[in-house]
Amino acid sequence: QVQLVESGGGLVQAGGSLRLSCAASGGTFNTYTMAWFRQGPGKEREFVAAIGRINYNTRYADSVKGRFTITRENAKNTVYLKKNSLKPEDTAIYYCAATARLMLATKRGSYDYWGQGTQVTVSS
């Protein structure tokens, strides 16, 4: 069983940057594909980014491509999401997720483990 704990959320002005972290425990981190999802006010939870476990390949939602970067540090059992050029529409609870599947899935149901989420608010 994998436990995921996100951190790094907060309030930031539009155009600013923020880095989220997700620390994993209870499993073998380098056997999991990791991802970030987000859920804005009144919206469905949506895919943001994913990173593979073998060659660290990545996949991004079109809405964040070029602004967000997902990375992982297996030695620290941690995945990161660096967010630049933030917009008010990026305001959401950001969730870390893990799956033993190899593919960089974008569907919520493809992930088996979830963190509790961290709030990010972008002011205009």
Image: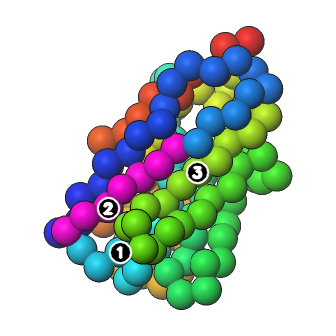
Q: Dot 3 corresponds to which residue?
A: 81
Q: Position of residue 103 (x, y in %)?
A: 53, 80
Upstream in sequence: badge 2 or badge 1: 2
Residue found at the far front of this picture: 75
Q: Is residue 11 above or below residue 78?
A: above
Mark-to-mark CA distance, 3 and 1 = 17 Å
Q: Dot 1 corresponds to which residue?
A: 29
Work out whether residue 124 or residue 46 is closer to the camera in this orientation and state it: 124
Q: In this rendering, does residue 3 appear at all?
A: yes
Upstream in sequence: badge 3 or badge 2: 2
Q: Quadrant of residue 98?
A: bottom left
Q: In this rendering, does residue 114 appear at all?
A: no
Question: Magenta stretch mostly in which secondary structure?
Answer: strand
Q: Position of residue 122 (x, y in %)?
A: 64, 21
- The residue shown at (29%, 79%) is 28
Q: Are marks 3 and 2 in contact (CB under 8 Å)?
A: no
Magenta-colored span: 20-26
Q: Of helix, strand and loop, which one carries label 3?
A: strand
